[in-house]
Image: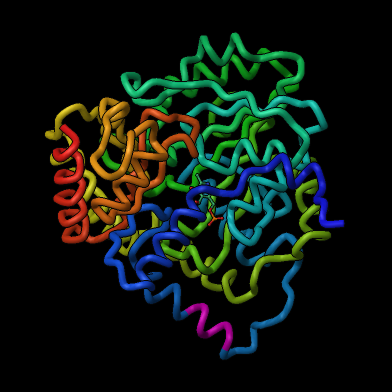
């Protein structure tokens, strides 16, 4: 009997992972695909951080740590959250995990009962709805518009809250749109959340440091009355170019964090001891990651500017200029319905991405993976030269459609 559980059958595999793997296989087969699908900085981990990991191994710091993470790292995280985000936590209100992805699924599993609703603004990070399903909860997707910079309308939020609403997931700066929620808008959400005592907020702040002035980051938990209602998630993968170290964390009221800790104790135990030492070094780089991080952010900004300008000049393309993260979520839907010679009809974001992979040899992710079929996601975690080459290829492939 090869049947699988209903839990597995209800979950979709991650499309970003699937496309990245497919593009990598093409490259390995000798096809020169430009890969702009992955959500991963193209930089190496800053040397001081990497050294701290190497030293940890040399010094025999290679055993299990406490399940919640080392006191040293949790103390450093508390300090960071106080200094940079204006939120006070004690180490017992922090849980370190093997990546922020684990922090989020554990939180969803810890607070949602079967049938609860998880409110997710779209475009969303691919994993949120699937995580809700894994917890037997129901994802409630709230669409946003490119003309409103993909920001959730508070009136729509208010109209969709029911007695079953348990969790609102906010992601700012956003993957996949790069939108950053202004403080004023978050304050409106806070007023709404305050009226619904059962509703919690999971604030995914993974891209906090990758933000382009004048945009600024606001932690939802720092808003009046929201500390008790918020689970703050952050990590090291993006800002510190540490995707392979697998290190993330959640901060929140002890009651909830202890529940996540219990789940983790039966799943994976604590994060890697080596990565945790590296994490301490990362937080030691200074405010917002110091120069090591600001150098990377500067490069991301140049790339964003290049893509927004050049792609913006193409016919029939709509762009909302991203204020953070390293993605561009572009509306190419004016190309849908067109018949491409020797390929067939471009019907949606999926077929447009297949077309671009086939004709332009550029790998992008279809927007339908993020709950918005009008767009595709370009990750600009690649050198300017690579992006210039990708742009020329995309341009040529699109022009041949007109
Ligand atoms: N949250 C968002 C919005 C992300 O884009 C990612 C990574 O793709 C994560 C969380 C998880 O990151 P990690 O598990 O590498 O810490």
278 relative to 339 in the view: left or right: right
Q: Residue at x 26, y 25 (%)?
A: 334
Q: Residue at x 12, y 34 (%)?
A: 313
Query: Percent position (x, y) of residue 242?
Result: 46, 65
389 relative to 345 in the view: left or right: left
Most foreground residue, 196 or 36: 36
**Among all residues in the image, which is located at the extreme front?**
342
**Does the magenta run of residues contain 56?**
yes
Quarter occupied by residue 239: bottom left
142 relative to 49 in the view: left or right: right
Query: Percent position (x, y) of residue 117?
Result: 71, 25
Against 308, is 181 above or below? above
Q: How is the image coloured?
A: rainbow
Task: Give the quarter of the figure containing the N terminus.
Answer: bottom right
**Does the magenta run of residues contain 273?**
no
Query: Percent position (x, y) of residue 246?
Result: 57, 64
Q: Is residue 284 visible?
A: yes
Against 299, is 345 above or below? above
Q: Residue at x 40, y 45 (%)?
A: 365
356 relative to 275 in the view: left or right: left
The magenta stretch spans which residues? 52-57
Against 68, is 348 above or below? above
Quarter occupied by residue 193: top right
Quarter occupied by residue 218: top left
């Amino acid at each position: 009997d090869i049947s699988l559980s209903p839990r597995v059958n209800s979950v979709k595999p991650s499309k970003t992972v699937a496309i990245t793997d497919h593009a990598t296989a093409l490259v390995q087969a000798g096809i020169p695909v430009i890969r702009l699908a992955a959500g991963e900085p193209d930089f190496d981990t800053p040397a001081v951080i990497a050294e701290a990991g190497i030293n940890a191994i040399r010094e025999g710091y290679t055993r299990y740590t406490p399940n919640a993470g080392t006191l040293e790292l949790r103390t450093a995280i508390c300090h960071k959250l106080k200094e940079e985000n204006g939120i006070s936590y004690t180490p017992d209100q922090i849980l370190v995990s093997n990546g922020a992805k684990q922090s989020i699924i554990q939180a969803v599993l810890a607070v949602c009962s079967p049938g609860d609703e998880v409110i997710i603004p779209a475009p969303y990070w691919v994993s949120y709805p699937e995580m809700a399903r894994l917890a037997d909860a129901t994802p409630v997707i709230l669409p946003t518009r490119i003309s409103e910079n993909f920001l959730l309308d508070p009136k729509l939020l208010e109209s969709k809250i029911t007695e079953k609403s348990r969790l609102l997931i906010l992601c700012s700066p956003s993957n996949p749109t790069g939108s950053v929620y202004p403080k004023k808008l978050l304050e409106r959400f806070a007023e709404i959340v305050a009226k619904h005592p059962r509703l919690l907020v999971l604030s995914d702040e993974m891209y906090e440091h990758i933000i382009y002035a004048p945009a600024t980051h606001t932690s939802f938990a720092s808003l009046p009355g929201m500390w008790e209602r918020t689970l703050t998630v952050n990590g090291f993968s993006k800002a510190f170019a540490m995707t392979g170290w697998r290190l993330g964390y959640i901060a929140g009221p002890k009651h909830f964090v202890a529940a996540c800790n219990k789940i983790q104790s039966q799943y994976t135990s604590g994060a890697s001891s080596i990565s945790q030492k590296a994490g301490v070094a990362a937080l030691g780089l200074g405010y917002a990651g110091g120069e090591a991080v600001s150098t990377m952010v500067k490069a991301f900004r140049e790339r964003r500017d290049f893509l927004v300008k050049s792609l913006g000049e193409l016919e029939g393309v709509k762009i909302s200029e991203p204020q953070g993260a390293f993605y561009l979520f572009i509306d190419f839907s004016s190309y849908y319905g067109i018949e491409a010679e020797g390929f067939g009809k471009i019907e949606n974001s999926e077929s447009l991405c297949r077309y671009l992979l086939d004709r332009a040899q550029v790998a992008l992710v279809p927007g339908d993976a993020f709950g918005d079929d009008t767009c595709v996601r370009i990750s600009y975690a690649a050198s300017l030269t690579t992006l210039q080459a990708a742009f020329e290829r995309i341009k040529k492939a699109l022009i041949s459609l007109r």
